[in-house]
Amino acid sequence: MGHLDGKVAVVTGAAMGMGRAVAITFAQQGAKVVAWDLGVTLDGRPMEDNPVHKVVEEIKEAGGEAIAFHGDVANMTDAENAIGTAIDTYGKLDILVCPAGFLRERMVFNMTEDEWDDVIRVHLKGHFAPTKFAAVHWRQRREYGRLIGFSSTAAHGSPGQPNYGAAKMGIVSFIRSTADALVRYNVTSNGVFPGAATRMTDNTLTAQQAIRDGKPLPSTVAGGTPGDPFNNAPIVTYLASEAGGNITGRMFGSSGWTYRLYSDESTVRHLYSPGPWDMDKLFEQMPQTLAEGMEAVKGFNAADVTAGNRGSL
């Protein structure tokens, strides 16, 4: 008996990395899977053979059930067709997982408009588009629905990823908003900050430096290590299952063999005025109240540059 027996799932970005790991694990746990992938390289070029078909073959060879779907996760027509394919093929949709995405790393002063727009589109709209059509189905059924979004700790700040970090924080808000909107229809909405060595992280600045140092691509040696994408699949499976039905609107972390629950943002301090703020009074009170104990970001900074020191940005 699997923990997802009888369930139907759509998994975006299912050809590689964490999407592949989730699709295969779901099938092992008894779910029927629509493995969705556009089949392009990280820079958007079509691949000769969409590797999502290999994932489907692997699932079937192991005795599972899956079909492939080609499409753009941020295209509304493709999203509607993907959700419709699950419903037409298997009679319903229970679970939607959204790992699909790519990187366009640049410092904010070097980033192009296209690099910003492309990343926001595939990550943020790539959650909205399929969720919209899944939510229509779940609202009609009022029986069961599970949305699991993929954010990133880059949402908390990452200097070379202003586009990616912004999209990933947007996903956190999207997950919480969707949880509030769909709870009345027996739908849960949760997210993960995953960690793994994948084709996408092979493209990061840190990984590229390792490659220049003669080391292998991190994703090619990740199997069985803390960087294995399959490490993320169990917590996603739990959130997608019947057992996870009491959890919604929450963010979980997954890195190596450790899982975490993140707290929602909460007010740390208050500063009150009985009427409109007097500017001088605010400047007097801020250091002893809201800004108390705050220090400048540590690291290579403008003072170092002025002093003629060297560092890396």
Image (cartoon, grey):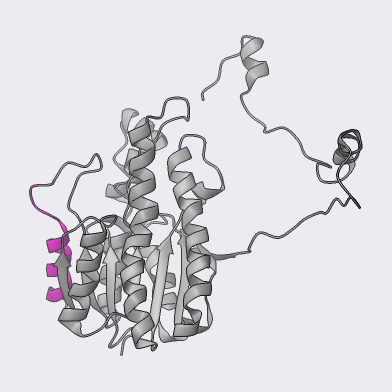
**Quarter of the figure with the N terminus:** bottom left
Left or right, 279 with respect to 40, comes to: right
Left or right, 65 with respect to 264, comes to: left
Q: Is residue 98 above or below residue 280?
A: below
- Closest to the observer, 239 or 166: 166
- Whether residue 134 appears in this view of the structure is yes
- Closest to the observer, 81 or 164: 81
Say which quarter of the image contains residue 14: bottom left
Q: Position of residue 138 (x, y in %)?
A: 36, 81
Magenta region, mostly helix, strand or loop? helix
| Magenta-span inclusion, residue 5 | no
- Whether residue 224 appears in this view of the structure is no
Q: Position of residue 237 (x, y in %)?
A: 39, 75
Say which quarter of the image contains residue 310: top right
Q: Range of the magenta residues?
A: 48-60
- Closest to the observer, 120 or 47: 120
Residue at 25% over, 63% down: 79
Q: How many marks?
A: 0
> Which residue lies most toward the front here?
276
> Which residue lies most toward the left here?
48
Q: Is residue 30 above or below residue 198?
A: below
Q: Is residue 220 above or below residue 232?
A: above
- Closest to the observer, 87 or 69: 87
Residue at 48% over, 61% down: 174
Residue at 13% over, 75% down: 60
| Magenta-span inclusion, residue 59 | yes
Left or right, 30 with respect to 288, comes to: left
Q: Position of residue 141 (x, y in %)?
A: 34, 87
Q: Position of residue 86 (x, y in %)?
A: 21, 76
Residue at 15% over, 72% down: 67
